[in-house]
Amino acid sequence: MIHPVILSGGSGTRLWPLSRAALPKQLLPLVSEHSMLQDTVLRLEGMPGVETPMVVCNNEHRFLVAEQLQEIGVERPALLLEPVGRNTAPAVAIAALALAEHETDGAMLVLPADHLITDVPAFHAAVLRAAEAAEQGYLVTFGIRPDAPETGYGYIRRGDALAGLDGAYKVGAFVEKPDRATAETYLQSGDYFWNSGMFVFKAARYLEELGRLRPDILAAARAAWISRKIDLDFCRLDAGALETCPSESVDYAVMEKTAAAVVIPVDIGWSDVGSWSSLWQTAEGRDDNGNIVRGDVLLEAVGNSYVRAESRMVAAIGVEDMIIVETADAVMVAPKSHAQQVKKIVERLQDGARGEHLCHTRVFRPWGWYEQRDIGERFQVKRIMLKPGAKISLQSHQHRSEHWVVVSGTARVTRGEDVITLHENQSTYIPAGMVHRLENATAESLHIVEIQSGSYLGEDDIVRLEDVYKRD
């Protein structure tokens, strides 16, 4: 059996302003109608012996991940919640510990949630070949055959061919991101491959090597697993144990040090979609001038550019090799050659205590979403959507009052001791300090406009008395 373990903990800062901390790139539909996480799961279909995937994700993303998996028909996936990120070596170790409790024979297939693979049959064939090597006790990674002297990827140099397994090689060396001249020599030699960050190995074998090479990481991972708590359909890992764990990748912790590392070179149409320029390279639907266009866009004398409009019309004239991305609260413009520097903008937003790197104007919650429409001195206006059957927590606010107007649907409203029903174009008022709840008991979405007023309007001015989603 093959047990997929999907790592969904990245933040995708180089794809800002579309990718944010609260909605990172793996949860966005960047290359198809599905999110990248959904595409990662869907491409497993048709592979022999594949079990239901296990997903390791950030605690804050748990409801979005669960909903996206449900949308594509994944029944009761194992969802492991990281209260703090500690890179891939501990995350994979915890997944291996989880599998070891129930399954000793199968191979783990470790996949990042935010990669693009266009040749799915070739991917399946490579995984099955890797599983054969894993059966022999090897730790397998995939090397992507380079088609350009890429300086943004690490490389793997292949060593001697693996006896008895065609197309597999001992790992000669892992190489850091090279400069342009060095990358040219790698491309010409034919012995170097891009490091894909995908792995196949037995759970017990990975734990054995991790324990030998980095016993401190294994000890912290084991403590986080042993002290786990079950919350709804989620498995919460212990925060205290993970906070003490060193942050290390699988490559650094194990693959670069073990004698059991094997690389299988593949040509599977792979990209890590790590920047806007790489998204331009891999996206389909290029126009006659080499442009990739998404949303309401008008171009005049524009070539080889990526232009994306999320909330309004974007017009561009007379530019070449550009990235232009618009969202409701930010516009980013850069030459494709500077696409890697988007991360520096995110760092400046963080240092400046701004919020545009954290979330969009539309913020998703397990019950639906809210969207900020206006804000000023002592007031804020939001649009709120509740999914069918959803309800917010029973709560109160110390510093603000709220006015609710139903735009469409039917609302069940708790106001203190009273429960009332509001229909389209009806409204109610919630004074500061009053216990209240908004609920959608129908089969249709509920949309309301909320007007907040008061001395403090922050999201932390919520006292939750009861919450079906078990949030703090």
Image (cartoon, rainbow, N blue to C red):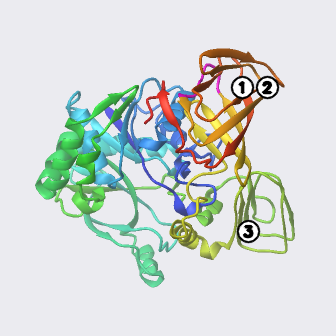
- Residue identified by numbered label 2: 408
Of helix, strand and loop, which one carries label 2? strand
Of helix, strand and loop, which one carries label 1? strand
The amino acid at mark 3 is Asn
Q: Which mark is residue 304?
A: 3
Q: Quadrant of residue 424?
A: top right
Q: Quadrant of residue 48?
A: top left
Q: Is residue 37 above or below residue 196?
A: above
The amino acid at mark 2 is Ser
Q: Are marks 3 and 1 in contact (CB under 8 Å)?
A: no
Taking depth in this image into account, of 66 and 164 the one nearest to the observer is 66
The amino acid at mark 1 is Leu
**390 magenta-colored:** yes
**428 magenta-colored:** no
- Residue identified by numbered label 1: 446
Relative to 255, 381 lies left or right? right
Relative to 256, 425 lies left or right? right
Q: CA distance from mark 2 to mark 3?
A: 43 Å
Visible residue check, residue 83: yes
Q: Residue furthest bottom?
A: 181
Q: Position of residue 66 (x, y in %)?
A: 49, 32
Q: Position of residue 325 (x, y in %)?
A: 70, 61
Extent of the magenta region: 387-394
Q: Are marks 1 and 2 in contact (CB under 8 Å)?
A: yes
Q: Residues within 10 Å of mark 3 (few under 14, many from 20)?
A: many
